[in-house]
Image: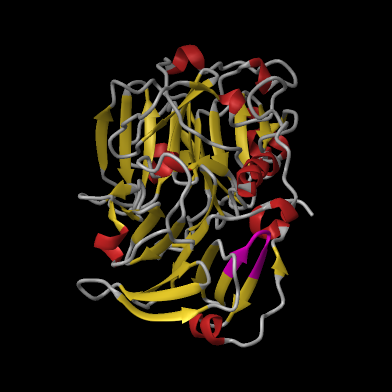
Amino acid sequence: MLLSQTLCLCLALALSHAAPTLHDVMMADHDHDHHKDQAHPKANPDRCDGIEFDAIAPDEKGHTFFFKGDHLWNGFTGPAQVSSAFFKELDHLGHVDAAFRMHNNEKPKDHDHIYFFLDDKVFSYYNHSLEDGYPKDIQLDFPGVPSHLDAAVECPKGECNSDSVLFFKGEVVYNYDIATQSIKERRWAHLPNCTSAFRWLEQYYCFHGHNFTRFHPVSGEVNRVYPKDARHYFMSCPNFGHGGEEKVPKCSEVTLDAITSDDSGKTYAFTGPIYMRLDTHRDGKHTFPIARTWKEVVSGVDAVFSYSDKIYIIKGDQVYIYKSAAPSTLIEGYPKSLKEELGIEGPVNAAFVCTDHHIVHIIQGQKMQDIDLSATPRAVVREAPLPISGIEAGMCGPDGVKVYVGSVYYHYETPRLLAFSKMLPEPKKITPDMMGCVE
């Protein structure tokens, strides 16, 4: 259950690199001309005073910038700085209306560029340098998108139907298809008017006032209770939420209940009622309640494995199967019993599947059972004793199999070597790079 602390620890760590723990979100209604102050704000504004941001956007390295007037904050901690220190052409503008980081793998020359919008102009930056030919009229780069925007946020294919940008102006949301340059207008009456918007770890946040609301980028749906105060989540403020007070656990205290990597490369580590994404290098490592992503799983898990674009979560004698694509959706008819789904009785200590294989390796105590997931009905096809006791989590990746026992892990080249090796490999310690802990 140490990962529980570990994952919270990562939140504190994350505050210095990327966004802090994001739990849930909400939105509010604001009129652009009324809420976006055209004048320069006071010198050195303090976001812990509860201000409203003009724009939020990460750069190509994953550093997130919060804009207010002619100032910005670089990351989730630290004081305000003059925007022109990072983007020198912003010196005479006073503010920006909206900003986003482009996601367009089909056009590498545009991918990861930051776009700023002011009145009827758009600016494109890469590596904090203004691209040749900019600023331009918005219509030249984004036909049909209005001027004087309130907010903007990218929406990659898989989260939206295609690589898109969501532009916000008043009560209207413009879904801009990057490839076809077509626009669909939407009105999400239940969603407040956004003065800035932010995509983080495949979740979407609408900021309004000093609050935020998390929403679905296709339907605009808002789940749970919003708005929430951004000072509890997106910045380190005294007497608010995390406020930098979370204690980062020592690596020697970290233990895992489960770990898995899905077909798209998303890697999840579970401990107690929380999980952490391990593959989000640019956004940092952060912890979340398991139920935030897999809402039917209200507390801890026993084992998790990925197979065929699905994530299998084993808890007690039940198996929950979710579609891997965001948002995670429970397959109809689940949960089912372990006996019905996999042909075994519980409890299960760990489980893993190797890429391009159909065998799930189930660890129960000091034995490993292999089950062919392509067969019907599913049943144990092979069983072997293990040289290691106390395995709590396991994962198979390009570099082989790792099984976790307490705060150490053992590395094997293949599942067969795990089962039949006569010599125990040297245990390896969990490191800060792996879990965001401290030594």
Residue at 71 percent across and 51 percent down: it is 253
Who is closer to the viewer here, 235 or 140? 235
Q: Is residue 250 left or right of residue 137?
A: right
Residue 300 at x, y percent in the picture: 48, 46
Who is closer to the viewer here, 420 or 271? 420
Looking at the rendering, in which quadrant would you find the C terminus? bottom right
- Name the image quarter holding residue 360: bottom left
The residues colored magenta run: 403-409
Q: Is residue 424 magenta?
A: no
Residue at 34 percent across and 35 percent down: it is 145
Residue 210 at x, y percent in the picture: 55, 19
Q: Is residue 62 left or right of residue 373?
A: right
Residue 214 at x, y percent in the picture: 42, 31
Residue at 64 percent across and 68 percent down: it is 409
Who is closer to the viewer here, 54 or 385? 385
- The answer to whether residue 284 is seen in the rendering is no
Residue 170 drawn above or below residue 364: above
Main SS of the magenta part reads: strand
